[in-house]
Image: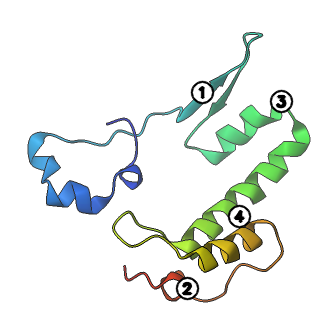
């Protein structure tokens, strides 16, 4: 499977014993290619420095922005910790998350498990 185990819940892999049936995860490099009509393409690599060099071909100022935006997204994902095997967030929580994304309230400092009642 050309992806990471993160895209398929580990519980699914475990419950269905997919390893016994030959399931393997591959990490292709490049991880993403976005072609443009004029023949150019943006290529994202697993190595952040290599991806930054690719971004530099399109925009020097976005190289710095990319690194901080990527870290922001990773931090946000860790804080909201959502699983396919738990109930979805409540509407009230969804509104709080939307406010955080819009910058109207800070990201919570609490453990994400506490934030949404999700036991990992």
Q: Quadrant of the N terminus?
A: top left
Nearest to the eye among marks 3 and 4: give it: 4
Please tell me which residue is depicted at 61% across the width and 78% down the height of the picture: 93
Disc nearer the start of the sequence (2/3): 3
The residue where tag 1 is placed is: 33
The residue where tag 4 is placed is: 72
Residue 99 rendering spot, x and y as whole percentages? 76, 73
Most foreground residue, 3 or 116: 116
Q: Secondary structure at mark 1?
A: strand
Most foreground residue, 6 or 82: 82
Most foreground residue, 96 or 64: 96
Disc nearer the start of the sequence (1/4): 1
Disc nearer the start of the sequence (3/4): 3
The residue where tag 2 is placed is: 115
Is 5 on the left-hand or right-hand side of 47? left
Disc nearer the start of the sequence (1/2): 1
Disc nearer the start of the sequence (4/2): 4
Give how far apart the Cα atoms at labels 1 and 3 are: 14 Å
Snapshot quadrant of residue 16: bottom left
Q: Secondary structure at mark 3?
A: loop
């Amino acid at each position: 499977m050309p992806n990471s185990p993160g895209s398929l819940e580990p519980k699914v892999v475990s419950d269905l014993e997919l390893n016994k049936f030959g399931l393997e995860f591959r990490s292709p490099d490049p991880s993403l290619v976005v072609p443009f009509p004029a023949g150019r393409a943006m290529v994202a690599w697993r190595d952040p420095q290599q991806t930054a060099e690719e971004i530099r071909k399109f925009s020097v100022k976005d190289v710095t922005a990319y690194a901080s935006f990527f870290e922001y997204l990773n931090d946000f994902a860790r804080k909201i910790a959502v699983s396919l095997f738990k109930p979805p967030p409540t509407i009230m929580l969804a509104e709080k998350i939307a406010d955080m994304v819009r910058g109207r309230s800070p990201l919570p400092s609490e453990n994400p498990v506490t934030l949404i009642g999700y036991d990992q």
